[in-house]
Amino acid sequence: MKNVIFHIDVNSAFLSWEAVYRIHHLGGNLDLRDIPSAVGGDVTKRHGIILAKSIPAKKYNIKTGESVPEALRKCPDLVLVPPNYNLYQKSSKAFINILREYGPVWSSIPSMKRI
C-alpha cells in the first residue's frame, strides 16, 4: 500500500468554527469567513490579540498574534468576535477523532490531554 501524507492547515479553524456555529446554531446570517473578521481578545481586559482571522482579513495584512488595536488601525471595519474556548475545544476534539478514524498513524497516537 502506498502512503499518502496530508498537510492540514488549521490556522483559521477558530474563526471557521465560530462562523459555522453562529450560522447553524445561533441562526445568524453573517458569515465571518466572507468578510474581514477575526477572533480576538478583549482589549479592556488586556487580552487584546488576534487569535484567528478570515481570509478577507489577510488582504489588510492582519496577522495572528498582533494586537487588536493594530489590526483595527489596518482595517477599521474589522468584525471582531470574542473567543469561545468551549466551542473550539469540542470542535478540535471532533476534528482529531476524524483524523484518527481515517488515518492509521493518528489512530495510534494517544489522546491529547488538553482536548
Image (cartoon, rainbow, N blue to C red):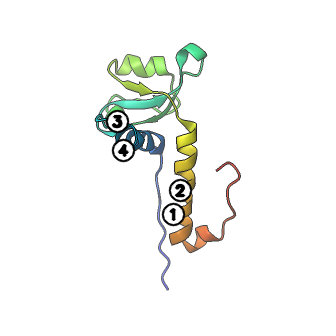
On residue 32, the disc is: 3
CB under 8 Å between discs 2 and 1? yes
Residue 55 coordinates in the image, percent (x, y): 34, 39
On residue 24, the disc is: 4
Q: In what element is the residue under mark 1?
A: helix
On residue 94, the disc is: 2
Q: Nearer the viewer, mark 4 or mark 3?
A: 4
Residue 1 coordinates in the image, percent (x, y): 49, 86
Q: Residues within 10 Å of mark 3 (few under 14, many from 20)?
A: many
Q: What amino acid does circle 4 point to? A: His
Q: In what element is the residue under mark 2?
A: helix
Residue 43 coordinates in the image, percent (x, y): 54, 17
Q: Nearer the viewer, mark 1 or mark 4?
A: 4
Q: What amino acid does circle 1 point to? A: Ile
Distance from the alpha carbon under mark 1 to that under mark 3: 24 Å
Residue 42 coordinates in the image, percent (x, y): 53, 20
Q: Quadrant of residue 93?
A: bottom right
Nearest the eye: 30 or 109: 30
Q: Residue at x 64, y 50 (%)?
A: 115
Q: Is residue 67 left or right of residue 74?
A: right
Q: In what element is the residue under mark 4?
A: helix
Q: Nearer the viewer, mark 2 or mark 3?
A: 2
Q: What amino acid does circle 3 point to? A: Leu
- Give the labeled residue for mark 1: 98
Distance from the alpha carbon under mark 2 to that under mark 3: 21 Å
N-terminal of the pair, mark 4 or mark 3, is: 4
Q: Residues within 10 Å of mark 1 (few under 14, many from 20)?
A: few
Nearest the eye: 79 or 29: 29
